[in-house]
Amino acid sequence: MTHPTDPVAAAKAIVETYLHLSMIPDPEGAACHVAPELRIIFTGGRRFSSPAETAAFNAKRYKWVKKRFLRTDAALDPETGEVHVYNTGYLYGEWPDGTPFETNRYIDIFRLRDGLIVETQVWNDSAEILLDRNGLAEAPL
């Protein structure tokens, strides 16, 4: 007897695998989990269409960066059949000057269709932290 696959559990596993591969970074491996029409929107509205593009962007912003997952939640949209996945936690790593960080909050929001990631929205505190480090923040962090 075969059991139907739980699309919500499958989508959560796909997202966590994608994120682990992205942190190596292994953009080619991460690309195995995305649809050809992938849209990636970073904080500030920066748009990318592949894991390789986001890896190149992150290589400029950070000396290195990883994610400490706090939780991954997901919900099936019964109208579209898409699964919406929310992964949240903290970024940790080093800025380009070697200064370490570890409490940079993030949330990544994914839409999956037919087992592939079609859209990712990436939100984190990096821009605010960089403004503060450069004396441009309107209020202290």
Image (tube, rainbow, N blue to C red):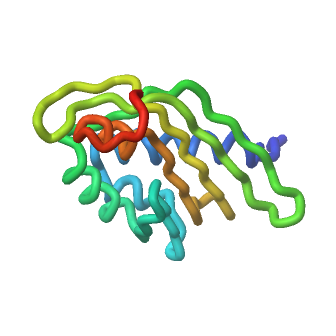
> Where does residue 113 sit, x and y in percent of width and height?
68, 63
Regarding residue 21, the answer to whether it shows in the image is: no
As rendered, which of 44 and 28 lies closer to the eye?
A: 44
Q: Position of residue 20 (x, y in %)?
A: 41, 39
Residue at (28%, 51%) from the top-left corner? 58
Looking at the image, which is closer to me, 36 or 101?
A: 101
**Is 124 situated left or right of 66 in this image?**
right
Outermost residue, bottom side? 37
**For the C terminus, which image quadrant?**
top left
Residue that appears at 42% across and 65% down: 46
Q: Is residue 10 something that shows in the picture?
A: yes
* Quadrant in which residue 68 is drawn: top left
Q: Residue 104 falls in which quadrant of the image?
A: top left
Left or right: 55 in relation to 75: left
Residue at (23, 41) in percent of width and height: 134
Of residues 70 and 139, the one nearer the viewer is 139
Image vertical order of residue 31 relative to residue 25, above or below: below
